[in-house]
Structures are given as C-alpha cells and as structure tokens.
Image (cartoon, rainbow, N blue to C red):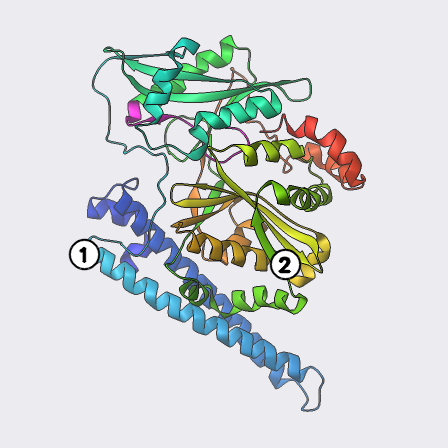
Amino acid sequence: MDVKTFIAAPESGLTSLGISILDTRGRELLTLAEQLTELKSCLKEAKKNKAEVARQFKTLEQSSDQREPLIAAMQSVSADIKDIEEKLKKTEKSLASALLTGQAQEVPIPSFVTIPPEQSYAGSYTVRELEMAEWQLWLNFLSTRCTSAYHQPVWAELIRKSFSHPTRVWIAVASDGKVIGGIPLTFFSSRLFGRFAVSIPYFNYGGVITNWINVAREIIKHLETVCINEKLTHIEIRSMQPELAEQCSNKKASMILALPDSEETLDEQLGAKVRAQYKKTEEYRPNVLFGKLELLDDFYKVFAQNMRDLGTPVYAKQWFANILSEAKINALLVVVYVDQKPVATGFLVGYKGMLEIPWASTIKQANTMNANMWMYRQILGYAIREGYQFFDFGRSTRDAGTYKFKKQWGAKPHTHYWYYLFPEGGAIPELNPDNPKYKLMINVWKRMPVWLTKIIGPPIVANLP
C-alpha cells in the first residue's frame, strides 16, 4: 500500500493490512499518518501566509516604514516553510518504509497501561473488594504488571495524608486464588461536590490493571454495583484503553514527545520558529535551577499567583512538600529566575522512561519574555541528559490553546478514555473550569488577593480530582 492511499483512510488501511488499531505496529503507523497529515496542513497554511506577505509587498511604497517588518515576516515564513518541508519529506519516507517493511521504528511509542483486544482470560474468576489483610496480594500483583506511576500504593497514601481521601481496591481473583486484575478507587465526599470515586485522582493515568480485556470489562461492570451500594453520584475511571465501557469521554489527549539522543538533535527537530521563541528570553539573562524542597517557596509563589490569575483554586503547599519528601517518588522542581526573581516554574515526576510535568506556571509579567518557552527547553534538555525516552507535556483538549502550545514542540497526542459509571438518570460530571456554571465563580476568584486564595483555595481544590 502506498502512502497516499494509507493517509486517505488510515484505519481502513490497517484493516486491509490485517493490523489491529491497538497493536503497537498499528499505533505507530497511525501516528506517522497523523503526523504527515498535520505537516501537510501546516505547509498549506505557511504558504498561504507567504502569499499574503508577498501581496502586501506589491501594494507597498518603496519608502514605507512597513517595509522592514514585511521583510522580517517574509524571512520568518520562508524559514517555517523550509522546516516543514524537511520534516514532511522525512516523515513521508518513514511511512513509506514502514508500509513496505511492516516496521515503523522511527516513531517510538510510550508504554501505557493497555490490553490487546484479542487477549481474554479463559478461566473462572470473581470480582470483589480487596480486604486490608490481603494488601500484600495487591502489592505482589502490581510488581509483576505494567502500571502507571500513580498505581503505586505510595500515591494513595500521599492522597490520604494530604487530603484525607481513602483509597480502596477491587480485584479479580482466579479460582486458584491468584489476582489477575484490579483497580484502585479513591473516594471523595463533600457538601459542595457530593460523594464520588475516581481512579486515579489529580493525575492523568489510572484505571484497571490486568492482562485480559474481558477481566477489565468485568471489573468495570462490577463497579456499577459499587456505585449504587456506596450511594455515589458517579465513578470516574481514567484510562488509555478504548472500548471498556459505554459512557466514555475521549476529548482529551496526553501530548508526549519522543526525545532524541542529544540536545543538538532536539534543536534541529524543533525548527527555527520555536528556537527563536525560546532564545528571545536570553535577552533577559534568565537562570534556571532544578531541585526539591529548597525551591518550594519560589515554586509556590509563582504557582499560587498563576492559579489566581486563571481563576482556579490553588493546592496547599503541603501537598507538594509531601510529594517531594517521599523517597519512593522521583519528583523535583524547576524554577526560572529573571533578575533573581522567580517567573516560571514546573513540577516534574519521572517514572521509568518518561518525565512528566503535572503542574507548570508562569507569571503574567514574564509572558513578553517568553519565559515559559525557555523553561520548557531547559526541561527537555534536562530530560535528555538524564536519559529519559519521553517527555509528557500533560493532557489537553484537542485543538485548544494548550494543545497547540505543546504540539509546536513536536509532541504527539495520545487519547485518553475516561469512563463514567452512575446510577440511572445520571450524567457525565463536569467538575472543571470549562463548565459554564463555574464562570461567575472563576471571574470572582481572579479578583481575589493571592494571600486569600491560599487560605480558601486548598479546601475546595482538595475535592476537585
């Protein structure tokens, strides 16, 4: 199959090739096809911009003071077109080779908790809640399975310690007593948001751990009864696995960049436009520090101010201190300074081959410096030097502003499948800033002094997963 035919209908192309959309090879081919389609769209837009600049040149008088800005604009868009064309050529060659040889080795795929659709458990089993006396069974099971960082019990303990939310586990047990699957659920209860459960709150990755697709579906089906018996408004299951249950939201995606072997290669891949953006910050002589608790005050100062500006309640500083103090978690802070003042910050968590940034903030005054761009370039350099294979920019709604910001770094989308269970007559909850009913509250919050948001914010955000 040729490239043109495949990108016209990638999923049909996989079917024709006899490849499952959930297989590693299928995901790699789809990623290449998506990348190629995006590049073609970007090239079309860049050429359109160049034509517009050229049109303005024709109507411009020789002595006009707009001539120099137009020359700069023409140089910039021409550089963009050259970068895109080079990437387009390379990607098209990679896809053609992958279709011909059946290998797509140039597009690494991060290891998510997913299950091949044809993999079913043939024996008998039951689903039930794990008893405290059986906790070692769960630990032993996790030690032999591919899990996200947040499935590790240390995170459940940190959530309990920081927010007082208990986590309980439901397991699938085979007839011989062996655990073959399970899911942790963290329970929330508040007057403001009601009683519900999430797997796993505050982070992007949770859901069922098992090697068997039928076991995963049965565990989720069993949780429908749990939802009723526990009198919950809903259960939210954060997964990367499609087709586990009926009620599902897949509008968000994790933006993940496969890291090259060196910073030099990274800069080549980023292209002239992105390089120009983060190099602008160097005019202000920025400094960057990576560390732990010694940077927490500076991190929190920027984070709290940014959350206020966004109209979002801020976490308590102790939440971050608890994570940084936990020896079993590879977490650290990054802080960018200009004139010895913190202007941009990030909270990093490393697990296996991936470095993730669950929280990042920049103060408004630093936006004109492109401090956020410069910080991300420093983080990517750090990730490469530390030997990480991937950098996770976090989740975004497709085509939203944050999605486009992450995309410009070369990050690729990996779809989230968040499942919802609720009693009859229930609906998918919208406990997020996109919900119109929170619009007034957000506008009021933006006008509060930062010191006040640090007091009243933590009790609220503790119940927002």
The percent position of residue 55, horizontal first and vertical second, equals 59, 80
- Secondary structure at badge 2 equals helix
Name the residue type under label 2.
Ala
Q: Which mark is residue 409?
A: none
Residue lying at 56% horizontally and 69% vertically, measured from the top left: 276
Q: Which mark is residue 101?
A: 1
Question: Is-magenta flag for residue 210?
Answer: yes
**Mark 1 surroundings within 10 Å by alpha-carbon count, few (fewer than 14), some (14 through 19), many (20 or more):** few
Task: Assign the N terminus to one quadrant of the image.
Answer: bottom left
Which residue occupies the extreme bottom position in the image? Answer: 62
Give the quadrant of residue 245. top left
The percent position of residue 178, horizontal first and vertical second, equals 27, 15
**Sequence-wise, which precedes: disc 2 or disc 1?**
1
Residue lying at 37% horizontally and 33% vertically, measured from the top left: 241
Q: Which residues are the magenta region?
A: 198-214
Nearest-to-viewer mark from 2 and 1: 2
- Secondary structure at badge 1 equals helix
User: Vertically, is 60 above or below 425?
Assistant: below
Instruction: Determine if residue 400 is in view.
Output: no
The reply, left or right, for residue 435 in relation to residue 419 is right
**Mark 2 surroundings within 10 Å by alpha-carbon count, few (fewer than 14), some (14 through 19), many (20 or more):** many
